[in-house]
Image: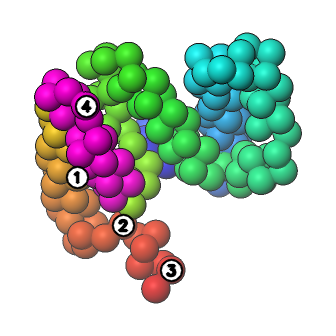
């Protein structure tokens, strides 16, 4: 959504160009999602052949094609979440950089990330794993506070317009 909004602000395209961009971005995120699923699956006992089959089947699921045709942000959110998991598991600092992008994709991402990281901190076997999860929770909270303050400054509301539209 933020990518499309930025495109719209900079280039001021017509409605159909913006819609086409949303569809292209959704398809790109769907492809990246399939690659991330393959990488995650190949690391398990499934092996690379089964992981490839899972990734291909994922691409053929009708629901995913509907998301692409609608240009929905959930495709981007799912991709960023999988990339977050990969970078978090690898111990990469890139996982911290993905937090604001996840928060910009979906309003409820703060709850998804906070709950998952809380359980990761709670279930961590070693203190370093606990520290890493807690540091990510802090980044999520700071990011959410900054995005919420920005949203209030620009739109005059703490909730995104999509929430108000559904009420």
Q: Are marks 3 and 1 in contact (CB under 8 Å)?
A: no
Residue 68 horizontal/vertical position (percent): 72, 46
Please report whichever mark, 3 or 1, sits nearer to the chain's N-terminal start.
1
Mark before the other along the chain sequence, 4 or 2 = 4
Q: What residue does disc 1 label?
A: 144
Closer to viewer: mark 4 or mark 1? 4
Q: Is residue 105 above or below residue 107?
A: above
Q: State the separation of the CA atoms marked 2 and 1.
A: 12 Å
Distance (Cα) linking label 3 and label 4: 42 Å
Label at residue 125 = 4
User: Which residue range is magenta in the image?
Assistant: 110-130
Magenta stretch: includes residue 121: yes
Q: Is residue 58 above or below residue 55?
A: below
Q: Which mark is residue 22?
A: none
Horizontal side, residue 24 vs residue 160: left or right: right
Q: Could you say which is closer to the camera, residue 131 or residue 27?
A: 131
Which residue occupies 16% across, 24% down?
A: 128
Mark 4 or 2, which is nearer the eye?
Answer: 4
Which residue does the numbered mark 3 point to in the structure image?
166
Q: Earlier in the sequence, mark 2 or mark 1?
A: 1
Disc 4, SS: loop
Distance from disc 3 to disc 1, alpha carbons, whole Å, reads 21 Å
Look at the image and tell me whether residue 2 can be seen.
Answer: yes
Residue visible at 61% across and 21% down? 44
Q: Earlier in the sequence, mark 2 or mark 3?
A: 2
* Residue with the mark numbered 2: 160
């Amino acid at each position: 959504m933020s990518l499309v909004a930025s495109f719209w602000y900079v280039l001021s395209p017509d409605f159909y160009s913006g819609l086409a961009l949303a569809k292209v971005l959704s398809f790109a995120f769907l492809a990246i999602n399939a690659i991330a699923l393959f990488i995650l699956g190949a690391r398990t006992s499934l092996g690379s052949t089964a992981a490839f089959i899972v990734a291909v089947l994922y691409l053929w699921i009708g629901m995913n094609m509907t998301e692409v045709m609608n240009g929905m942000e959930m495709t981007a959110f799912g991709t960023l979440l999988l990339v977050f998991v990969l970078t978090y598991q690898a111990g990469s600092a890139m996982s911290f950089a993905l937090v604001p992008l996840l928060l910009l994709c979906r309003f409820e991402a703060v709850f998804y990330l906070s709950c998952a990281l809380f359980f990761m901190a709670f279930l961590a076997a070693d203190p370093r794993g606990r520290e890493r999860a807690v540091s990510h929770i802090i980044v999520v909270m700071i990011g959410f506070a900054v995005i919420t303050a920005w949203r209030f400054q620009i739109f005059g509301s703490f909730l995104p317009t999509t929430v108000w539209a559904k009420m």
